Amino acid sequence: MPKILCRCNNVLNLILSPSKHGYRLVSESLIDSLYGSTEPVNDIVSKVNLSTVMVYRCDSCGRLIVFWDKQKNVPKFYVVEQPDELAASGKTDDLSGSAGGPSTLGHSPE
């Protein structure tokens, strides 16, 4: 997968590794399981690499391109909502969410 075509028609070049567009999404449960681990660092890094979800950010439109299923290699695109869209929906920029936890504010799947 040397390139990704974003929905805005921007091409993300992934030939260089690590990619300036790439991020890894790690579950909280995986992070919790690593606290206090006595495993060698290389084993921990391998475990994280195998368990993460690859995410790329388009430098043109800001969309997040997420590969949830490693087997299918089919991305989901998440678009950044504009501030006026947030105001119209009644949401705010408060990231604490309504119950004090994280919020999904700012991104909606396409």
Image (tube, rainbow, N blue to C red):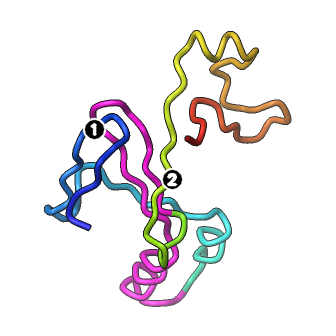
- Residue range in magenta is 38-67
Q: Residue at x 43, y 50 (%)?
A: 65
Q: Which amino acid, by three-letter code, is at mark 1?
A: Asn
Residue 57 belongs to the span the image colors magenta: yes
Query: Within the image, what quadrant is residue 95 found in?
Result: top right
Instruction: Between residue 91 and residue 78, name the one nearer to us.
Output: 78
Residue 86 belongs to the span the image colors magenta: no
Element type at mark 2: strand
Residue 15 left/right relative to 70: left
Q: Quadrant of the N terminus?
A: bottom left
Given the current orientation, which residue lies at the most extreme right position? 99
Q: Residue at x 64, y 17 (%)?
A: 86
Q: Is residue 69 above or below residue 65?
A: below
Q: Residue at x 35, y 30 (%)?
A: 61
Q: Label 2 to label 1, Cα distance in Å?
A: 15 Å
Q: Is residue 100 above or below residue 87?
A: below
Q: How many marks?
A: 2
Question: Dot 1 corresponds to which residue?
Answer: 9
State which mark lies toward you, 2 or 1. Answer: 1
Element type at mark 1: loop
Q: Quadrant of the C terminus?
A: top right
Question: Dot 2 corresponds to which residue?
Answer: 76
Residue 8: image x %, image y %? 33, 34
Residue 9: image x %, image y %? 28, 38
Residue 102: image x %, image y %? 70, 41
Residue 6 left/right relative to 34: left
Q: Is residue 89 above or below residue 23?
A: above
Residue 101: image x %, image y %? 76, 41
* N-terminal label among 2 and 1: 1
